[in-house]
Amino acid sequence: MNGIGMENDRLLERFAAFHRRTEDSVEIAAARDLVTGIWRHPRDAAVAFRYHRDTLPSGRYWIAGAGPQGIDLVRALEVRTDIGILGFVDRKAHLYDGYCGLPVVPADKAADGRIIVANRVWEQDILDDMTGSGIAGDRLVPTYTAAAFDALAPSDPVDLPDLQSIRTLIVRDTSQVSLIPEATLRHVFPADDTLVVYTSSHPAETPSPWYRSHDAALSVTRVLRLIHRLQPQTVVLATMPHFNDWVLPLCPPDRTWRFVFEPNDMTLVYGDTLRELVPISPRHLDRCRLAEAWALRHADMTVTNCQGPHWDTLLTAVRGRAHPFFSGPELAASDPPSAPGREPLRILYAGGIPQNYLRAAWQTDYRFLPLLAALALRDDIAVDIFNAYHTQPGHDACYADLTALAGGRLGYFRARPFPEILQAAHYDFGWLHRGDIPRRRPGEAGAGNDVLVLNKRFTAYAAASLPIVIDDQLDAMAELVERFGAGLVLPAGPLDAGDVARRLQAADPAALSSGVRRLHAHLASANASTLASLRIFTHGG
């Protein structure tokens, strides 16, 4: 493994800088007020469409963002014959050849007309980016953040008779997205005194099978009102990165509740690549990093999927503390794969691969595809790729290049539940090697958080007793594979498929199976310790 020298470490410098800023009570208070102001009322798309349909002055308009929300607004405005829709303004306009019959242009090409910004999640980010790129404020027509929208915003529910004696309030994005699954949390927080508040609901989602739930409709004010009404002993914030700034209003210094922060990812450890994946503005990204630094210092408990000596050094730099939890499928350790006694060896990649127009931003993560294709050309290797992001036939066009790779001993498949994958076929290795990648220090341009985290593919392979093939630049995970003898740590960079195949064939299956089971026991022990600490912390035992 490469190891990371701490000298001139940009990530360490970033942690230290944000730590210093958390000591400025004026800046923290201003950031807290800003977050509360941006997310001050529930966001209902139907109300937003009615707002524009009824109040928009006559004229010609662009819609910010080519996507479902944008086209729904176009349709809502069709009744207004005095309004002309020119098309969509999108930061990724170069990836579109029009959208739903309308042109898609970058902001600097939208010369005429005003621009309507109506995005439930990213509205403030879009406004920040457009004003930052020189678009005059009077050309922008905000929606959810507009003062005039306040009077139309949905009111909070008044009658909540079943919400009594709530000891724990869990605020999270959805029932499916969080570090610690609800199926695990139910053994820590009893259902009869716990309420889950989803930051936003989605029509296709089912309610929590474990807890009573409530929709915050993207309103931090609604969450705060629930806290003050219900007076819970503990508030848990389990977020995706772009909601991490909700820490600031939910973890004030004068709070009367215990606060647990459970980020699914932390923006502090990401480089600028995050902005290529999601439209988070520089101001919002800065706010999320400030909130995370505040939480590491001031939350009563922080739970993350980060690991390793580098992470420990970063925590020391901010005088922070965190407990590890390594999320993955709800699987007990399985029996080790039995030696198939036949060729070929079978490699499994089960993880997300972004759509083709996003993949360029993450070339450091997805350069392994040519290597897997080359391995599958051999008689002694077979490869199956299950893409967790390819969830429906409507995505097929965005993965046409991957479908074209399939054939012979290379299989490419849409998303499938991990236990189902394991039941359908025998595999000898789980793949995490990222291929021919440049070395980047954490925090540098283009760097992700992969040096510090233990991702879900890693823990899933360990739970399935699959030896792991990994590159030496995934420091925390590679160190564990090496320590427990749980797979093969190969150098990052260009690899010869024949050399890789020979190493795979020469590996000792029994030794690797023993090692990966020791790794799984290590991860399970860390998770059990964190859950026990969480139980003791919140309930006294």
Image: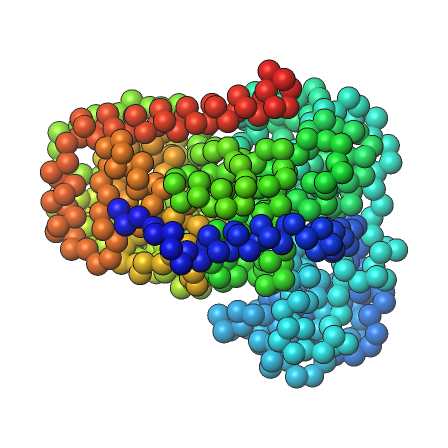
Left or right of residue 246, residue 380 in this image = left
The foreground one among 78 and 324 is 324
- The answer to whether residue 61 is above or below residue 128 is below
- Tell me what residue is drawn at x 30 percent, y 25 percent: 518
* Quarter of the figure with residue 105: bottom right
Count of marks overlaid on the render: 0
Residue 226 rendering spot, x and y as whole percentages: 78, 35
| Left or right relative to 5: residue 448 | right
Horizontal side of residue 118 vs 155, given as left or right: left
At x 78%, y 45%, the residue is 221
| Quarter that holds the C terminus | top right
Residue 244, position as x, y percentages in the image: 61, 47
Image coords of residue 260 (percent x, y): 62, 34
Viewer-side residue, 407 vs 372: 372
Residue 379: x percent and y percent? Answer: 12, 46
Which residue is most to the top? Answer: 541
Q: Quadrant of residue 281?
A: bottom right
Visual colour scheme: rainbow
Q: Can residue 304 be seen in this snapshot?
A: yes
Residue found 65% across the figure and 49% down from its top:
23
The vertical placement of 405 against 470, above or below, is below
